Image: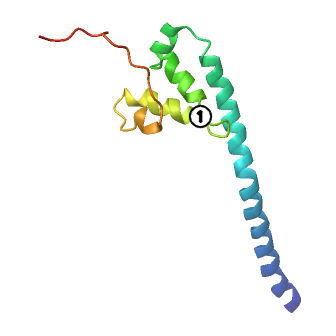
Amino acid sequence: MIILSSVLPLASSALRLVREAAAVVVAPVVSLGRALQHRREITALAELDDHVLKDIGLTRTDVHGALAVSVLEDPSHVLKGIAGAGHGQAVGAAGLGVRRAAVMGCCPREA
């Protein structure tokens, strides 16, 4: 009985260490898999018509800018920030390191 009461806490802490180690190894793999899945989905967005992209609050430049981030990064965070920037969120495209193309002369100047 004494042996069992001293072994159980050791086994419990060993199990906890194994779980924590597995989480450290598994979390980045899951994150990379999710980033690759999002990259495939955003690549499919690039094939949509410009009018459809506009309906969801994006431009073709936004999509290409998101796909320009490192393959190891999740491009959906870039698009989320860009799409949210037009809806009152504080983070804009510039804050995410994405540059939008400027169209010169698109708006008439006021006198």
Residue 21 at x, y percent in the picture: 76, 63
Q: Residue at x 70, y 51 (%)?
A: 27
How many dots with numbers? 1
Depth check, front residue: 52 or 64: 64
Q: Residue at x 82, y 86 (%)?
A: 5
Depth check, front residue: 93 or 14: 93
- For this view, does 52 lie left or right of residue 84? right
Residue 75 at x, y percent in the picture: 59, 33
Residue 78 at x, y percent in the picture: 52, 33
Point out the residue furthest to the front here: 104
Q: Residue at x 62, y 39 (%)?
A: 73
Specify the quadrant that holds the C terminus.
Answer: top left
Residue at disc 1, secondary structure: loop
Answer yes or no: is residue 1 visible.
Answer: no
Depth check, front residue: 98 or 10: 98
Task: State which quadrant residue 1 falls in.
Answer: bottom right
Q: What residue is shown with label 1?
A: 69
